[in-house]
Amino acid sequence: MHPDVSADLSSLDTTLLTVEKVLDVEELARRINELEHQAADPELWNDQDHAQKVTSELSYAQATLRKVKALRERLDDLPVLYEIAEDEEEGADRDAALADADAERATLREDIEAIEVRTLLSGEFDERDALINIRSGAGGIDAADFAQMLMRMYIRWAEKHNYKVEVYDISYAEEAGIKSTTFAVKAPYTYGTLSVEQGTHRLVRISPFDNQGRRQTSFAEVEVLPVVETKDSIEIADNDVRVDVYRSSGPGGQSVNTTDSAVRLTHIPTGIVVTCQNEKSQLQNKVAAMKVLQSKLMERQRQEEKAAMEELGAGGNASWGNQMRSYVLHPYQMVKDLRTEYEVNNPSGVLDGDIDGFLEAGIRWRMQDHEG
């Protein structure tokens, strides 16, 4: 085997050993066993929220363990592929076999690096579900359309990973697109993974809404919060919240329900407003809206603490949350992250949910940025 290939295989083995150690494969197997026992208990579904958490954690842990074991098997098989190739006689067959082995080594490196990123998620709330708010910004009807494109992008990403999505609220714009939306992606570590998406996203394209076919730049804001759990101490006094109920409305102003089931909560001390209109009943909407409000208040509290730390000289990234990604559809095709420099020339694939490369680059960038 060529020395460069041997060195590369040794490097891959070192990385995978680190991943296996950080993920603690034996502990993961023990946790799966424990969760399987919980999932088999018929009493579990008496508490729907807890049951969904257990089944979600179980499927995530099983998938992680399967992935790590499969990577180890593939890495163990690689030297054999090279041996088979080298046993071939000089010529086309040997060249093809070596090319196959090289291709598998390149793919394996990508797959090992992708799972290595998961080991970088060690923040306080990283293992939680993600709550995503998207708001259209400057750019009128194009911005509203762009906000809807981003919503679809994240939901398609979740679907590709078999993660559950719960949409709490969509405020439709008059002509096309949406003014804002709030939804949760429910799977372990989705907050840690998607938190690097926070900031201003920019779209450049020929506007489909401009009858003169001019180029238009529009903006949308993405906010990512960790979902609040029962152990969090976010107390909200009843008299601090104003509750308004109204009739849900869909695109084009049509009424979704004939009853006043949609709920708007206004947190009087901070002025934060949260709406929820996707559940069947007013009570369900109120419970969902309260969870969103708690997440927003928890994040506000974290930001205030962070600002206080920065004043004490603890450092931090002042530009976080500013313009962070451009989606250019005209005059050329490119999506580029302005923080990591990661870019792809396939905007339609990205907008269809192929964002893992951006997420991986963002997580590594954040790690280096904080270390620096």
Image: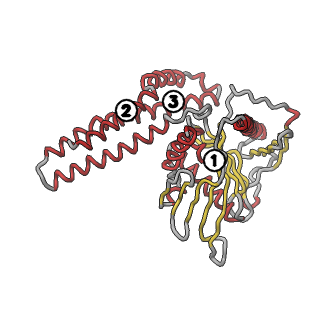
Tag 2 residue: 69
Q: Residue at x 65, y 49 (%)?
A: 319
Front label number (1 vs 2) = 1
> Mark 2 belongs to which amino acid?
Lys
Front label number (3 vs 2) = 2
User: In the drawing, what numbered circle is on residue 58?
Assistant: 3
x, y (%) of residue 287?
75, 36
Q: Are the two marked residues, 3 and 2, in contact with CB atoms closer than 8 angstroms? A: no
Residue 20 sits above or below residue 260 on the image: above
Q: Earlier in the sequence, mark 1 or mark 2?
A: 2
x, y (%) of residue 345?
47, 61
Q: Quadrant of the C terminus?
A: top right
Label 1: how many residues lie within 10 Å, few (<14), some (14-19) or many (20+)?
Answer: many
In space, the residues marked 3 and 2 are separated at their CA atoms by 17 Å
> Mark 1 belongs to which amino acid?
Gln
At mark 2, the secondary structure is helix
Q: Residue at x 13, y 55 (%)?
A: 91
Residue 261 appearing in the image: no
x, y (%) of residue 320?
64, 47
In space, the residues marked 1 and 2 are separated at their CA atoms by 33 Å
At mark 1, the secondary structure is loop
x, y (%) of residue 66?
41, 33
Q: Is 35 on the left or on the right of 72, as rendered?
A: right
> Mark 3 belongs to which amino acid?
Leu
Label 3: how many residues lie within 10 Å, few (<14), some (14-19) or many (20+)?
Answer: many
Q: Earlier in the sequence, mark 1 or mark 3?
A: 3
Q: Quadrant of residue 47?
A: top right
User: In the drawing, what numbered circle is on residue 198?
Assistant: 1
In space, the residues marked 1 and 3 are separated at their CA atoms by 28 Å
Residue 212 appearing in the image: yes
